[in-house]
């Protein structure tokens, strides 16, 4: 029993040290960036939308108010298997709208359709040479309920002008203090973007694509969009890394997102994410490890760690559960095992506190974290369901 808890404790401690390593790297000063040339990239803004009539107009209005030349971007909406007037709203809002009807459901398929059509659009419109905006420097994919910061497109433009091939935006949760669900989801968000994503970019590793993604248009022209799983963002992250395309996290490129307010509303979304990650791990883990060995490139082992580490709430649950089992079954005084487990639990608490402090979290969010035990149990049950379920999860079906 001593050996089992010793090995388990050392394993958890190793993962935490890895997370602290990324967190420490996030605090390193960024390398000097080139002086802004003043040039502005041209964007094709792609919005996949399934029955989004309730939020799409707000997003279109928001884009129109962003501080960026209107002749440097065009908006394209994929009205994907819609049963409402999403397409009508898109066209009235000045977007080019493509309607898609297919039995292949999901955001990944809609994004693929949109990027394929964008490449065709460039070729068709470019051949006409009508003096309009027909060829783009970057393809930006956002969700239909995303709101941009005023300087958002400027920030992305500068990254593209500097040579970034793929850029991950800084997604900030709107009103995280409104409900326990939002506060607890916000916790995972700030730990990722403030510590892991920023740390990876400082180290020169690739970071995660999550939801809102910007690519130098040559990336899509060359590689296309192959990610049609229910976690298309992490799938495409791994695909790009294997094809020598690094994703850069841009903390200055801020967008604002809303997340479900209740546990019930968030259930289907979490089942997709948690269940989908198991499948992507099985598909890509061996590939990134082999590539890392072949190239002697530690960044591929970082990608492998990303695939192997469970969602943070599950990771925390495992630590706490194993710690109590240790106290119950194997505690025999202040020995090596005890000090290892105390280091693990203390390290977990310090890591969480660091992320919250760096994010400038409000007091109400801290109070909502009292619901963490329920949230952890809820997420654990979802992961178990996702891992055991043989049912194919989709984007649009309620369960």
Image (cartoon, rainbow, N blue to C red):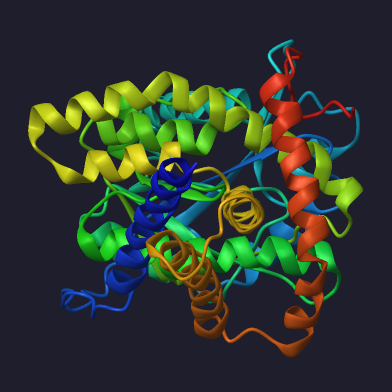
359 and 317: which is toward the camera: 317
Query: Quadrant location of the C terminus?
Result: top right
| Whether residue 79 can be seen here | no
How many numbered circles are shown? 0
Who's the residue at 58% across and 87% down the image?
A: 360
Question: Which residue is painted at 55% across and 27% down in the image?
Answer: 278
Within the image, what quadrant is residue 224 found in?
A: top left
Query: Considering only vertical position in the picture, is 125 above or below 95?
Result: above
**Residue 288 appears in the rendering:** yes
Residue 368 is situated, as x and y percent measured from the top left of the image, at 81, 75
Is the residue 28 above or below the residue 119 in the image? below
Q: Quadrant of residue 35?
A: bottom left
Taking the image as shown, residue 320 lies to the left or right of residue 199, namely right
**Which one is nearer the viewer's eye here, 263 or 46?**
263
Up the image or down, 300 lies above or below 72; here it is above
Which percent across, then down, holds residue 264? 91, 47
Q: Which of 213 and 190 is in front in this view?
A: 190
Residue shown at 78%/34% (left/top)?
50
Q: In this view, does 210 lie to the left or right of 292?
A: right
Q: Tell me residue 81's x, y (percent).
A: 79, 23
Q: Please state the horizontal and vertical placement of residue 323, each as a whole percent of the image.
A: 59, 57
**Residue drawn at (67%, 66%), measured in percent from left and top?**
186
Task: Classify 342 as above or below 101.
Answer: below
């Amino acid at each position: 029993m001593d050996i089992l808890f010793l090995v388990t404790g050392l394993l958890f401690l190793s993962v935490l040290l890895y997370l602290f390593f990324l967190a420490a790297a996030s605090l390193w000063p960024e390398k000097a960036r080139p002086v802004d040339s003043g040039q502005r990239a041209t964007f094709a803004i792609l919005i996949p939308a399934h029955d989004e009539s309730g939020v799409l107009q707000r997003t279109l209005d928001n884009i129109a108010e962003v501080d960026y030349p209107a002749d440097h971007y065009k908006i394209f909406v994929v009205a994907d298997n819609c049963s409402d007037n999403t397409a009508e709203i898109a066209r009235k809002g000045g977007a080019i709208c493509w309607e898609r009807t297919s039995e292949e459901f999901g955001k990944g398929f809609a994004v693929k359709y949109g990027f394929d059509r964008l490449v065709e659009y460039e070729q068709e419109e470019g051949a006409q040479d009508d003096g309009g905006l027909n060829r783009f420097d970057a393809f930006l994919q956002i969700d239909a309920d995303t709101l941009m910061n005023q300087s958002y497109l400027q920030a992305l433009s500068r990254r593209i002008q500097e040579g970034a091939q793929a850029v991950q935006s800084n997604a900030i949760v709107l009103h995280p203090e409104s409900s326990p669900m939002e506060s607890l989801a916000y916790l995972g968000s700030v730990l990722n973007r403030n510590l892991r994503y920023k740390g990876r970019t400082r180290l020169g590793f690739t970071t995660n694509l999550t939801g809102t993604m910007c690519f130098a248009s040559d990336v899509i022209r060359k590689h296309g969009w192959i990610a049609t799983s229910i976690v298309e963002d992490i799938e495409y992250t791994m695909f790009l890394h294997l094809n020598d395309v690094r994703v850069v996290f841009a903390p200055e490129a801020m967008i604002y997102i809303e997340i479900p307010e209740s546990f019930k509303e968030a259930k289907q979304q979490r089942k997709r994410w948690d269940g989908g990650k198991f499948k992507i791990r099985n598909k890509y883990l061996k590939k990134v490890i082999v590539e890392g060995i072949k190239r002697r490139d530690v960044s591929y082992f970082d990608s492998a760690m990303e695939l192997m580490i469970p969602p943070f709430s599950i990771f925390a649950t495992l630590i706490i559960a194993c710690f109590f089992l240790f106290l119950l079954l194997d505690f025999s005084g202040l020995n090596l095992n005890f000090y290892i487990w105390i280091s693990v639990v203390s390290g977990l608490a310090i890591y969480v506190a660091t992320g919250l402090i760096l994010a400038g979290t409000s007091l109400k969010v801290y109070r909502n974290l009292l619901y963490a035990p329920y949230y952890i149990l809820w997420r654990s049950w979802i992961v178990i369901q996702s891992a055991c379920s043989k049912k194919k999860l989709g984007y649009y079906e309620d369960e």
